[in-house]
Image (cartoon, helix red, strand yellow):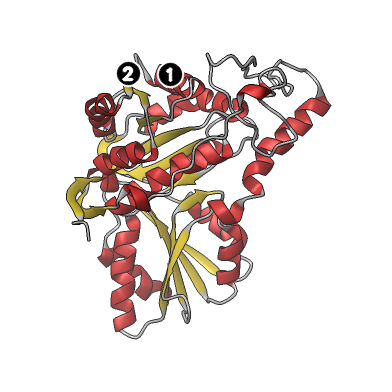
Amino acid sequence: MPSKNVKLMQGNEACVEGALAAGMKFFAGYPITPSTEIAEISAQRLPRVGGKFIQMEDEIAGMAATIGGSLAGLKSMTATSGPGFSLKQENIGYAMLTEIPCVIVDVQRGGPSTGLPTAPSQSDVMQAKWGTHGDHPVIALTPSSIRETYDLTIQAFNFAEKYRTPVFLMLDEIIGHMREKIEIPDPSEIEIFDRVTPDESEKESYKAYDNNLEVPKMAAFGEGFRFHVTGLMHDEFGFPKNDTTVTEVLMSRIMGKIENNLDDIILYDEYYTEDMDLLILSYGGTVRSVLSAAREAQRAGKKVGVFKVKTLWPFPEKRITELSKTVNKILVAEMNLGQYFYEVDRVAGKNCEVSLLGKANGEPITPTEVRNKIEEVL
């Protein structure tokens, strides 16, 4: 039996190692606290595996270069935090419409504006969903441990490649800068998905945006396949079309490739949900305090369950609706003043009472605060 590969690892480091395991060969970005270690470690590690790192002049250019790396056939990633996430949004919208697979890591910090650069927050949740203009598909994942950061980074690349779309990995400063002992899985145990590419026989007939396929095949620039890439609505070859029928077909397909695969994309964990009076829903670094408080409540005889969100978007509406019919109250714990809470209330509020434990002062939600809230609502 091979020896276990156990390491003490920071969250941002685990993100890079997961990206490399998934096949990342290109990183472009701009340093910003608390994500900077992702760029620094990528700069060290990528040349050793035949990859490329480039620091661009700003976040806008970092996103543009990430798109270019993916168009050239490389699995590509960028990383940022709140203000930089805002700057990337126009190019993120471009990548959504042009169906460019890439991973955008947002290590969230206190905001708005420059805010609290070194303090934790979960205040970019709605920005991940609605940050760029227009209707667009969204996949956003969020880890709550260092090992989960490693695993969900790989999953983010797999989703990006499988569905040919940008994918957000929403860390928070707690997870990004925390260090934990983790076991790195053997490469043989890791499932890797690569984009589907056309073969040589398809050069003359290749359609980069073939509407007969839920996810069209993706050729790389420079390989002899002719296609156009534009942020305008476009036909199957990528050429601009100011046509309502063409637009409807295109938009239906790019939205449908996510909406038709929710069972594959939506990830979550449940604890103590078989018999409960209160369900606490949380994600990211806040889950750790929630689980600690829930375990203590269970020992005290209180029926408290936990729903840990791993896929923020698409929203796990089906399961939350089901759970809301089995419980008296739902408590949403998040490091903001109410973002995911409103989505939960939208789908569960007609079945049970939904309340918020929110915090946005740069401090994490503590187990004591969760315990006190449990006493208040039960």
On the image, the x and y values in percent for residue 215 come to 64, 37
Q: Please, what is the three-letter code of the amino acid marked with disc 1?
A: Ala
Q: Is residue 108 visible?
A: no
Marks 1 and 2 sit apart, C-alpha to C-alpha, by: 8 Å
> Are dots 1 and 2 in contact, CB under 8 Å?
yes
Label 1 Cα neighbours within 10 Å, binned few <14 / some 14-19 / many ≥20? many
Q: Residue at x 36, y 31 (%)?
A: 79
Quadrant in which the C terminus is drawn: bottom left
Q: Which residue is mark 2?
A: 54
Element type at mark 1: helix
Mark number, residue 220? none
On the image, the x and y values in percent for residue 300 come to 30, 84
On the image, the x and y values in percent for residue 315 come to 56, 52
In front of the other: 327 or 218: 218
Q: Earlier in the sequence, mark 1 or mark 2?
A: 2
Q: Which residue is mark 1?
A: 65
Q: Please, what is the three-letter code of the amino acid marked with disc 2?
A: Ile
On the image, the x and y values in percent for residue 136 come to 62, 35
In front of the other: 341 or 216: 216
Q: Residue at x 48, y 42 (%)?
A: 193
